[in-house]
């Protein structure tokens, strides 16, 4: 009797273990906003470590964005474009290295280009955060196809912060 109980428990543990390995951890959705105009909006965006913006982003690191989107036409190439706005009125393009800007090689779950109309895919965008001042920034992320049409676009507020290992210098005028 005890042996059967031990065997049953062992089988259950193995099943739970295998299910845990197979289950993919999906990040919770992040509350992003629409771009101005009538640009296509993603199905869902997940920013690692952020559900409600502004998202705290550590400078000098890479921030992961998982972007689920559907396309409405045949697409052979997609490129990520980023615009950053700070102080409410200063907007500049945020230059990305070519391997980071290329969407097709960074599609997840076995997806690849070309993409066909109505196909929905997930793109892993690894956003490099430079060594910038600690400020709030509104970022607009566009995925643009081979014809310069916008496949999807969203806005996310971020707050650039120092990492835990950063050195902070303070002036002490009292000594």
Image (spheres, grey):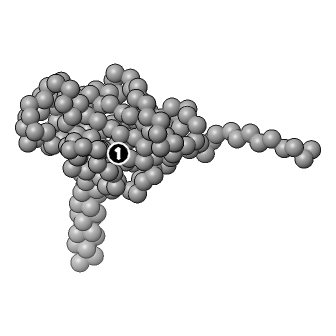
**Depth check, front residue: 80 or 102:** 80
Query: Image quadrant of residue 83?
Result: top left
Query: Image quadrant of residue 155?
Result: top left
Farthest front residue? 89
User: Can residue 68 be spotted in the picture?
Assistant: no
Q: Position of residue 152 (x, y in %)?
A: 23, 40
Q: Position of residue 95 (x, y in %)?
A: 41, 26
Q: Position of residue 78 (x, y in %)?
A: 22, 28
Farthest top residue? 98
Q: Is residue 43 left or right of residue 158?
A: left
Q: Which residue is mark 1?
A: 155
Residue at left 29%, top 36%? 142
Q: Is residue 17 above or below residue 65?
A: below
Residue at left 63%, top 41%? 165
Q: Is residue 88 above or below residue 79?
A: below
Q: Position of residue 163 (x, y in %)?
A: 58, 43
Q: Is residue 116 left or right of residue 34?
A: left
Farthest bottom residue? 1
User: Can residue 70 be spotted in the picture?
Assistant: yes
Determine crowd level at label 1: few under 14, some 14-19, many 20+ residues with C-alpha closer than 10 A: many
Q: Is residue 132 above or below residue 120?
A: above
Residue at left 7%, top 37%? 117
**Depth check, front residue: 26 or 132:** 132
The residue tagged with tag 1: helix, strand or loop? strand
């Amino acid at each position: 009797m005890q042996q059967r109980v031990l065997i049953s428990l062992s089988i259950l543990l193995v099943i739970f273990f295998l299910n845990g390995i197979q289950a993919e951890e999906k990040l919770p959705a992040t509350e992003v906003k629409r771009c101005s105009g009538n640009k296509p909006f993603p199905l869902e965006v997940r920013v690692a470590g952020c559900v409600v913006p502004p998202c705290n982003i550590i400078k000098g690191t890479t921030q992961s964005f998982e972007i689920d989107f559907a396309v409405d036409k045949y697409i052979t190439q997609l490129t990520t474009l980023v615009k950053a706005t700070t102080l409410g009125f200063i907007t500049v393009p945020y230059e990305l290295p070519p391997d980071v800007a290329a969407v097709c090689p960074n599609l997840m779950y076995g997806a690849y280009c070309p993409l066909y109309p109505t196909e929905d895919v997930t793109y892993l965008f690894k956003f490099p955060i430079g060594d910038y001042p600690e400020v709030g920034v509104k970022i607009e992320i566009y995925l643009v196809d081979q014809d310069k049409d916008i496949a999807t676009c969203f806005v996310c507020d971020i707050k650039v912060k120092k990492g835990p290992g950063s050195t902070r210098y303070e002036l002490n005028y009292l000594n």
